[in-house]
Amino acid sequence: MKDLIYILTVLTFFGCGNTVKKETTTTSDRMELVPEPDKDLREEHEKSMEKNSEQAASTTYMGKTEDFLNLKDKELQADFFYKLDSIRKVQYPNNDQEASITVDLTPEYLIEFLADINSDSLTANKQFEKEYHFNIAPKDYTGSEICKDKIAVSFDAENCSFRLNIYNTFLVEPDWCTESMAVYGFKIKNDEIVDFWRQEAG
């Protein structure tokens, strides 16, 4: 009887061992199969991320101060004045801007201003200004030479936009000048004027 119990115990022991071994083997086989697809998926994900980063970099707008000089291009100039005229039609639906003391930039003065810009100074200081004499004054006033007009451009590196100020100064009293100002904001992107706006002051 003791011998029978001993034999059964030994068989039971080896049976559990075989079972554990089989389960371990099966589990081990599963673990060996999992990493391969995970590795492939990870590589595909990394490649996808790299591609998206490259596409984002190619579409990111990185404006520079010296981009303002691109306005020397006739087509870009035409786009600038088209945007200016379009917004003036909205701001002056009755075409009565002559009643305003504000003077807008003309193509002639833009060309002159671009020729006068010191590119090194513009790039280093992110701004440039130059005095002129427009000889333009509202009705009943005089555009005296003692009253200097001015064009000034500045670059906002944070949002890559330009601000262009047009100061028109005229004589009010024999020795007193006052001024009005037209202010434009815009970006130059892909050889186009974008995000254009116009305001008046004075």
Image (tube, grey):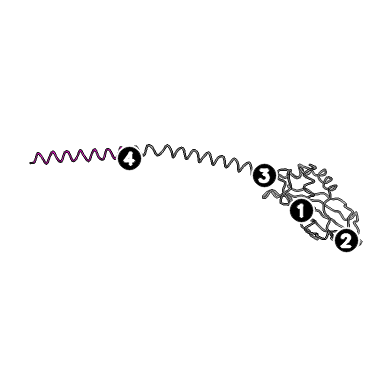
Answer few, some or many: residues within 10 Å of disc 1's Cα (few below 14, many 20 plus, some between 14 and 19). some
Within the image, what quadrant is residue 12 found in?
top left
Q: Residue lying at the far front in this picture: please name it.
A: 94
Counting from the top left corner in percent of width and height, residue 106 is at 84, 50
Of mark 2 and mark 4, the one earlier in the sequence is: 4
Main secondary structure of the magenta stretch: helix
Q: Is residue 129 above or below residue 171?
A: above
Mark 4 is on which residue type? Thr
What residue sits right under mark 3 in the picture? 62
Q: Please name the amino acid that badge 2 sits on.
A: Trp
Q: Which residue is mark 4?
A: 27
Q: Element type at marker 1?
A: strand
SS at circle 4: helix
Specify whether 8 is left or right of 89: left
Q: Earlier in the sequence, mark 4 or mark 3?
A: 4
Q: Which residue is mark 1?
A: 184
Query: Residue 19, how many percent across, how many down?
Result: 25, 40
